[in-house]
Image (cartoon, rainbow, N blue to C red):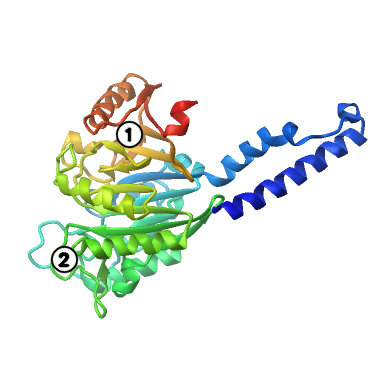
Amino acid sequence: MNWSGRSRWIVALVAFALFAMVLAGCSGGGQGERATLGDVMETIEEGLQEAESVSIAAGGDVNFGDGVTPYLTRGGMGYPFEDVDEVFAGADLSFVNLECCISSAGAPVPGKEYCFRGPADSAQALAAGNVDVVSLANNHSKDYGTSAFLDTLTHLKESGVAWCGAGNNDAEAYAPTVLESPAGKVAFVAFTGIIPNGWPATASNPGCATITDPERVESAVKDAASKADYVVVSFHWGIELATSPDADQRELAHLAVDSGADLVLGHHPHVVQGLELYKNRLIAYSLGNYVFSPPREISAKTFTLVALLGPEGLVQAKVIPTVISGCRPVLLYGEEASGWAQVLAGYCEELGTPMRLAGGRVFIDGPASAAD
């Protein structure tokens, strides 16, 4: 919200509050004392903070194919996010990376080692789990060819789930997906740095937005910032099983923030990486796996992120230790949560991120919160 918008909020809220206090005085409340501006400003500022802040919940890689499909068959579409759907429902908007196509069509791309395809109705699992938007900018969205890729777009649309980072052409793939929140418009853009042959979107080829041209990434983020109050940027990047981001990730994340990103969400390493504060904006370098059939223990340990963003950047982030059990994310509590939280805090410390541990959770405070 710009300053003129904030001014209108102040005028409207002050008028309403004064009017309410006058009514209270007329009815005997407050002994008929005259309401003053000072009497109501604290309430006004609290109302503004709530109105101008947006909460984003996020998880990592979601794959409805491979070993996850039998769980969908047995447990139904509510199964994958059953333990975390309230976290997603409690946020203004929620995000995951969809690490598969959703279709009953197509064939595996020849020569590709891992090809993931979820059942044609599995987009309903995202809707049932209160997922609002997914990234399709990754190295698995076209695993079964263009027809299955286009089916994915159709099934997501039918289920009421938005997507970013992909489309029928490059104009669509690089364009922001803008969603409404109580704090205003939130734009999502996504890019992949893991790029199989045939994946990039072009003027005539459906596909994904990529990081190949940093200037186009910068332009896309700036375009998103011009159309929304907040911008969330997603990157599919990094080195598999590396628990620390590399120099290229950090450079690209900083470019995104410099271009207008308020939150950066990364994925692909299949393990989690630390979070960084850069210019008061939060960067989660790898959210790890989420709905997945992980082949190793370290790939089963993940986290659920809830970030509260304000006009000046991060207000507070809550990192909830999570483990994949039965191919779905399960929130951790007690000693198990505290142990994993310590590891996550260590990853953040490596990036110079100030944080605190409380109740088996990792909290990262923005400058305003830290000063309170």
Residue 360 visible in the current orientation: no
Q: Say what amino acid the circle numbered 1 marks.
A: Thr
Answer left or right for 200 relative to 169: left
Q: Quadrant of residue 127?
A: bottom left
Foreground: 293 or 237? Answer: 237
In the rendered view, tell whether residue 245 sits above or below residue 190.
above
Task: Pick out the residue farthest to the left.
Answer: 111
Foreground: 54 or 342? Answer: 54
Name the residue rendered at 21%, 69% in the picture.
200
Name the residue rendered at 30%, 31% in the picture.
353
Residue 89 location in percent, x, y?
49, 45
Q: Say what amino acid the circle numbered 2 marks.
A: Pro
Please name the residue that numbered disc 2 is placed on: 108
How packed is label 2: few (under 14 Cα within 10 Å), some, or many (20 or more)?
Answer: some
In the rendered view, tell whether residue 46 sits above or below residue 293.
above
Label 1 secondary element: strand
Which comes before the other along the chain, label 2 or label 1? 2
Task: Pick out the residue farthest to the top.
Answer: 335
Name the residue rendered at 63%, 40% in the picture.
47
Residue 24 location in percent, x, y?
86, 35
Label 2 secondary element: loop
Name the residue rendered at 65%, 49% in the picture.
9
Residue 134 location in percent, x, y?
36, 56
Residue 331 visible in the current orientation: yes
- Disc 2/disc 1 C-alpha distance (Å): 31 Å
Please name the residue that numbered disc 1 is placed on: 322
Q: Quadrant of residue 175?
A: bottom left
Residue 58 location in percent, x, y?
37, 45
